[in-house]
Amino acid sequence: MENKKINKFIPYGRQYIDQNDKNAVLEVLDSDFLTTGPKVREFEKALCEYTGAKYAVVVSNGTAALHIASLILLNPGDLVITTPNSFLATSNSILYAGAKPIFVDINQDGNINLDEAIKLLEKNPKIKAVYPVHFSGNPVDMEKLKFIRENFNVKILEDAAHAIGAVYDEGKIGNCKYSDITIFSFHPVKHITTAEGGAILTNDEEIYKKAQILRNHGMVKENFINKDMAYDKKGNVNPWYYEMQMLGYNYRITDIQCALGISQLKKLDSFIQKRHEIAKKYDKAFENSKIKPLYTFNKNSAYHLYVVRVDFSKLNITKAELFYKMREAQIGLQLHYIPINKQPYYQNLGYGNENLPNMYKYYEEAFSLPMYPALNEKEQEYVIEKLFDIIK
């Protein structure tokens, strides 16, 4: 392959912003509402229409979505099955609610092993929830998630921070057909961005209403408890009155961000199509080589990440050296993820000795390659060429 020169750094992921996105933001900047205005509800409605969920509550970031979801679904002391192969926020949100994560090993595709989760559910009635992550944008085994939903009295949260736009046999991820809540993230490296942002989707009206209240300091402006303070002597609502009924948070998102999200959502399907093209090109390049894609091409995956595995024990280079050498070549690799149970904070809580052989082997071998809609053919060929050069 001809050696190509690249004059800019190629990261593992980045946003795509066009003039329509900029115009949408500028329109809001000229409007009367910069936050808590009509664009928030418009974005929520658009997410419902896209996914098929009944309700959506958009918030300041994906972690805020997880936090609110966990406060709604969990009680202190609950045991919650989840994956060690995720960003810290997934299991941290369980801790925020005073509950306790139980880490289950992963399959070869990086997703949680739901067979192992089912075995634990059969043995331990104290387990109250399951938090699967659609890792890399590839849906977990939804038939097994359906089985859990129908056979165990547990709450289910789908962490779909990687998976907006992913599909399965019964629709789009986010329709909450087999879960109480699905969350999305709109960080710049995700499929669509609001700069920072997240969403809670549900088909349960009670969950929806609680999420709205928790997003805004636990405040309500209806259904008041303190009647003597809320109403005057003639029964009129005091127009200034609000009531804090829960311990909530300021997890609001701005109209500026939501305008960007609405514009981005219109391009989501084209973004995923481009990610599929990139994935197919990587797959073809790595055929019969030492570089093994995490899974063969799957049209249902939203391909937030393109992960490969390499057995470094058979090479004269370590994974750290590969990262450094690729960075010298202006290419950013990333590791998704360090096993959460091995983090010092979790080890201080008593974690770290779990029997998770697939996760530990995965950590030794896996890394993510550049994957985003603006990655052009020349840049991708350069990534592939440099990766082969260095590994050889």
Image (tube, rainbow, N blue to C red):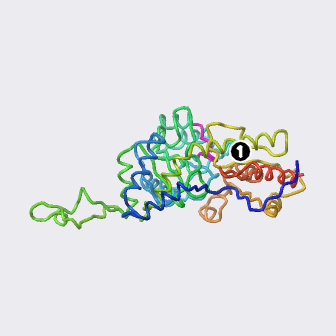
105 and 187: which is toward the camera: 187
- Left or right: residue 121 versus residue 246 is right
Q: Is residue 138 magenta?
A: yes
Total marks placed: 1
Element under label 1?
helix
Quick one: which residue is furthest to the left in this view? 234
Q: Is residue 265 magenta?
A: no
Report the residue at 72% width, 38% height from top. 296
Report the residue at 50% width, 54% height from top. 261
Please report the bounds of the magenta region as a residue range.
134-141
Please, is residue 66 above or below residue 153 in the view?
Answer: below
Given the image, on which type of amino acid does mark 1 rest?
Ile
What secondary structure predominates along the stretch shown in magenta? loop
Q: Position of residue 75 (x, y in %)?
A: 43, 54
Q: Position of residue 173 (x, y in %)?
A: 53, 41
Residue for badge 1: 278
Picture quadrant of residue 233: bottom left
- Left or right: residue 29 versus residue 221 is right
Picture quadrant of residue 89: bottom right
Q: Is residue 248 visible?
A: no
- Left or right: residue 75 versus residue 274 is left
Q: Position of residue 162 (x, y in %)?
A: 59, 49
381 and 44: which is toward the camera: 381
Q: Is residue 388 visible?
A: yes
Report the residue at 81% width, 64% height from top. 328
Q: Residues within 10 Å of mark 1 (few under 14, many from 20)?
A: many
50 and 222: which is toward the camera: 50
65 and 32: which is toward the camera: 32
Q: Position of residue 169 (x, y in %)?
A: 55, 32
